[in-house]
Image (spheres, coloured by chain):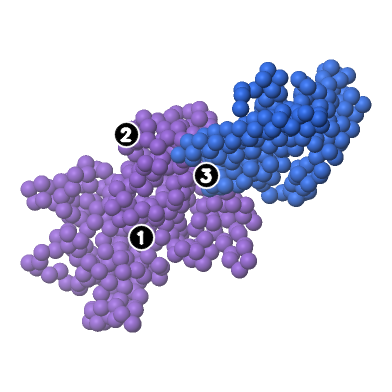
Chain colours: A purple, B blue
Amino acid sequence: MALEIAVEHRRRDFVVTAQFTAPTPGITVLFGPSGAGKSTVLAAVAGLLRADHTRVDLNGERLDRLPAHKRRIGMVFQDGRLFPHMNVERNLVYGLRRAPGGQVLAGELADLLDLHQLMRRRISTLSGGERQRVAIGRALLSQPRLLLMDEPLAGLDGPRRREIMPYLQRLRDTLRMPLLYVTHATDEVYRLADQVVLMEAGQVIAAGPLPELAARVDLALAARDDAAGVLLGYVHRHEPERGLTSVACGGEVYLVPLCDVPASNSVRLRIPAREVILALDAPRHISVNNIVPAVVSAIRFDEKAHAALVEIDVGGGQLLSRITTDAAERLHLRPGVRVLGMIKSMSVELL
Amino acid sequence: MTLPTAEEREVILLTLRVAALAVGCGLPVALLFGWILAARFPGRFLLNALIHLPLALPPVVTGWLLLTLCGVEGPVGAWLWKNFQIRLAFTMQGAALACAVMVFPLMVRAIRLGIEAVDGRLLQAARTLGAGPFDRFLTITLPLAGPGILVAVTMGFTASLGEFGAVITFAANIPGQTQTLPLAIYSALQSPEGDAQAARLSLYSVVLALTGLLLAEQVGRRLRR
C-alpha cells in the first residue's frame, strides 16, 4: 500500500523534478523555501497543472490517467476557495454530492472540525480560520482517495494558526488516506509529518521519516535555529504526585511535564537541539530528569557561529545537540564516541 | 399628454412581446457562445468576428441575409416550412428573430465579460471536488456571472425595442403582426398628418427604454449584494 509520485515540469529556466513515495495512510509534508516547486508538484498531482510528465500511482492505480474531476483527489488551497454564492452547508455538500456512494461520516467530520455552528453562515462572514476549517471539511466530504493541502495555514495569523492546528493534529490520527501537505513553516512539519520530502530549487533533496530527516545535520531542518530531534513513542504512565508523565521511546523512558494524553496513546516528542546537554560521565545531584546513553553519529561545525551540531543515536531514535565548538573539542566528540544526552523535562515538547 | 389609444397599446404590447421573445430565445444561445468565447482556443477570433458581424453590417443587409436564408424560398425557411409548417418571414416570430440576431453580439459580449470575471481558482476548486466542465458551468460560472448575464438581458431587451432595419427588411411593416414601435413611428412620419402621432410614439419609446434601464439597475444592485 503506497503512493508513488513522479512529476517533471520545465518552464523556461525553472525545472521541477520530484519523485518520492508516500505512506498511506499518513501525512507526507513537502517542505522547502518558497519557489522550491512544492506547489507545482501538488497542482500536477491534482491534475490542475498539465506538467510535462506526471505519475500518480496509488496502490497500483494510475490516477494521473484520469481527468482532474475524476481523480477523486481532494485539495485544500491556501486561499480557501470557498464558493461565495453558497452558504457553508452548500459548500460542504458540493463535493459530497458528486462523490460515489460509500461510507460517509459527515456527522463525525462536522464534530471533528467543529462545523455545526457554521452551517447557515455566508462565506463572507467567516473568519480566516473558519474558512479553512470549512475548506478542509469540504475536501474530506468529497471522499477523496488522496488529500492535498497547499499551505493551508499560510494565510492565517499566529492565533488563527494555533486555532486550526489541533484540528489538523486530530485529523492526523483519524486519516484513512494519504495526505500530501505543502508548507514552509517548521512547526507544521514537526507536528504533522510522518514523512518529509525536502525540496529546494525544484529538486528533492531528501525524503524519509520525520525523525530521521529532522536529525540529519546536513539537511535544511537541522540547519535552522529551531532545529530539534523528534522521537516517536507512547505514553507509558502518569505520575500525578510527581507532576510528571513518562513516555516510552524505543526502550528508553523520558519524563515530561504531566499531560492529559491517555496512557498507551502514541505521542511524539520534540527536543530542541539547543536544549540537549552532552556529558561523558553521569553527574550526580542534578535537576535534569532525563539522562540517556547515546552514541555520536555525526557532527557538523559552523565555524562562523563557533557552534557544533551533534547528531546522537539514543537507541529509540536520533537527537540533535547544538553546543559550542569549544565544548565539542574539550569532549573530543567525533562519530562513534559514547556520550550521555541530558534533557530537562521542561525542554521536551509533547506534540 | 393622454394615455395611449387602443391601437398604440397594441403597438407597445407587440414591441414588448417581440423583444421578450428575441431575448428569451437568444439568451441560451448567447450563453453558450459567451462560454465558448471565454475559453482560449484556436479559431476564437474568427468565431468572435462572425458573431459581431451584425454589429458591423448595415441592418438592411442583415435583414436581407435573413430573408435569403430563412425566407420561404431560402434553405432554412423551406426546411422549417416543409417539416414544421413554421414560417418566419413576415411574421411576429420573424421580427423577434431579426431582433435576436441584431442584439446577439451585444448579449454575447456582456456574457463573455461576465464569465471571464469569474475567479478561475474557484473553478479549479470545483474540479477537485468532482465537477466536470458542464457541471462547473452550471453551478459556479453561471451564478457568479449573474451580473454580466443581467446586463446582457437588459441590453438585449432595450436594443430589441428599437430594432428597425433588419426587422422591416425580414418581417416587413404589418400592423398588429410585425409593426413594432420604431416601425410605427416610421409609418407615422410617412403620412402627411403623422407628426403628432410620431411624437407620441417616440415618447412611449423613451418611457419604455428608461423603465427597462432603471429596472435593470435595481435588480443589478440586489444581485451584487
Estimate the x, y position of residue A69 in percent, counting from the top left: 58, 40
Foreground residue among B47 and A156 = B47
Q: CA distance from mark 3 to mark 1?
A: 29 Å
What chain letter is assigned to the residue under label 3?
B
Task: Identify the residue position indicated by label 2 in the image.
Answer: A117
Give the residue type that dot 1 points to.
Thr
Residue A350 pos. (x, y %) = 24, 53
> Which residue is found at the position 44% from the left and 29% from the top?
A103
Q: Chain of mark 1?
A: A
**Residue at left offset 64%, top offset 43%:** B110
Label 3's element?
Answer: helix
Where residue B225 sits, quadrant-wise, is top left
- Within 10 Å of disc 2 (Cα), the crowding (few <14, some 14-19, many 20+) is few
- Residue A30 against residue A23 in the figure, above or below: below
Quarter holding residue B202: top right
Identify the residue position indicated by label 3 in the image. Answer: B122
Position above or below: A184 against A217: above
| Side of A206 relative to B78 (left or right) | left
Q: Identify the mark at residue A186; answer none if there is no mark.
A: 1
Note whether residue B168 is visible: no
Give whichever of discs 1 and 2 has the lower sequence position: 2
With A97 as the anchor, is B202 left or right in this view? right
